[in-house]
Each structure stands twice: as C-alpha cells, then as structure tokens.
Amino acid sequence: MKKYLTVFKISWARELEYRLAFFLGRSRNIIFLLLLYYVWLSLSRMTGRFAMYSADELAAYVFGAHLLRSVVFGSQTREIAWDINNGNFSNYLTHPVSHFWYMFWLQAAQRALYFLSAIFELVIFVFITKAHFFRQTQWQLLLVSILATVLASFLYFILTYVVSLSAFWSREAMGPRFLFEWILEFSSGSFFPLDILSKNLLAVFQFLPFAYLIYFPLKIYLGGWNAGQIAGGIGIQAVFIFVFAALARVVLKRGLMRYSGEGI
C-alpha cells in the first residue's frame, strides 16, 4: 500500500507542476458553470419549475454535477495508450506494481485535487451570484449518495481503462477514446438531468453504465427515488463494476500477448 501512496503523492505534485495551466483550466470550469447555471435558471424563470424540477433543485443539480465531475471523471488513463504506443508500458512489466492499481492511484490524486478546487469554485460562485439551491437534510440519503459516488468513480475508471487498452490493437486509440468521452459526458447526466428526456430515451440511457456515473448519485441526493430504486441502482453499479473489471483483466492479458515494446 505504501508504494501506491507514493504514486498518489507524485501524481498530486505533477498536477501542480504547471500552476498557470491548472489555474486556467479551473477558470474555464467556472465560466462553464456560470453558463450552465444561467441556462437552467432562464428555463425555470417563468413558472419556477422546469420539467419536474424546481429552480432550487436545478441549481442543486448543476452544482452537484460540477462536484461529481471532479470526483468521478479523470484523465490519467489517457496515458495508457501513449505508453503502449511508445513502448513505455514495458516499465510497468518490470516493476513490482499492478498496472491497474498504479493508474488508479494516479487518477485518485487528480480527482482529490480537482474536488478541492471544485469546492472552492462553488463557494466563490455562490458568494457572487447569491444562488439558492436545494440542500438535502436526510443523512441517510447523503450517505447513500456518497456510496453511489464512490462506486461511480470506480466504474468510470474501469470503463476508461478498458477503452485505453485498445491501443494494443491500434495506434489511433485516442480517437475512440475521445468519442467515448463525448458520448459519456452527454449520457451520464453531466449537463442535464436525464429524466427530462422522453421515457423511451431515458430507458436507453439507464440501460447503459454511463447513467450511473453522475445522474444516479445526484438523483439520490435530490430524493427523487425510493429505497427499492436506490438499492437496485447500487446493485447495477456493482454488477457493471464486476463485469468491466473482468473484461479489463481479459483485455489486458490478450493485449500483452500482442505487445512488442515498439519505441523503446
């Protein structure tokens, strides 16, 4: 465990190495948050509601999505494709570490740093705009939403890990990765609650693992589901994690059979 904590510390330091780039990236997120907030505010201005959400609930969804994106989403697994294509992946084969957990802790540091930054951004945003948003007071729902967020974070990591391993078969793995992330952003509920869509389209999204990354934890926080729906959603998250973890193991094993260390 100590070696992975060291990986965490190194990744944290690396994220802060280029402070101006980090600051500009977070500034961009504030602009995006302002844009998204005022779009939903304008939609609910006339009646105080939009679809099945009040203005305060929409604000809570926007703020919650901003926080969850920082916790759930990460980008460190993009390095996997680069390492495979330039031969650096060989380094992991000679070191006494699990490549899967090494990448997990690299990404965990990024998530922790971005989460702290997101909290700071939201404090500034609320102070400037005086925005009102729904606050969940039932501690049981808060705890379950945290559990769902932890599972969502792990599910996202496994999904992107599997996609990045496609570099064993193609040097253009970043193209499919970009397309995958674009689809994921839209269908995870990052920009809007999925249940404002038609029932048929919502059913399609709920059949995919992406809806359990952002939309599902936020719906728990907003109190939109009963105990049975919450338990079923948690179970689906666990099943997806198990299935894609097993797939990652198979893909990595077969990929290593093709790996030639090209570029060393």
Image: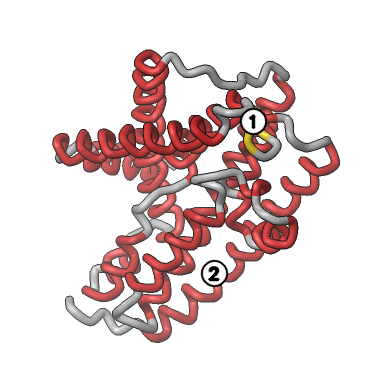
Give the labeled residue for mark 2: 249
Mark 1 — residue?
49
Compare residues 44 and 73 and report the one nearer the observer: 44
Residue displayed at 39% across by 86% down: 258
Q: Is residue 177 above or below residue 44?
A: below
**Within 10 angstroms of label 1, few (less than 14), some, or many (20 or more) residues?**
some
Spatial CA span between label 1 and label 2: 46 Å
Q: Which secondary structure, mark 2?
A: helix
Secondary structure under tag 1 reads: strand
**Which of the 4 image quadrants contains residue 138?**
top right
Could you say where residue 130 lies in the image, as x and y percent from the top left? 43, 14
- Tell us which disc is closer to us: 1 or 2: 1
Which x, y percent locates residue 24? 20, 37
Left or right relative to 131: residue 96: left
Residue placed most toward the observer, 211 or 107: 211
- Quarter of the image for the C terminus: give it: bottom left
Residue under the point 68% across and 47% down: 195
Q: Earlier in the sequence, mark 1 or mark 2?
A: 1
As displayed, is residue 97 above or below residue 67?
below
Residue shown at 52% from the left, 61% from the top: 159
| Residue 87 in picture, x, y percent from top left | 24, 74
In the rendered picture of this protein, how many numbered marks are placed on residues? 2
Q: Position of residue 156 (x, y in %)?
A: 52, 53
Label 2: how many residues lie within 10 Å, few (<14), some (14-19) or many (20+)?
few
The amino acid beneath tag 1 is Arg
Q: Quadrant of the N terminus?
A: top left
- What amino acid does circle 2 point to? Arg
Judge whether 27 appears above or below 100 on screen.
Answer: above
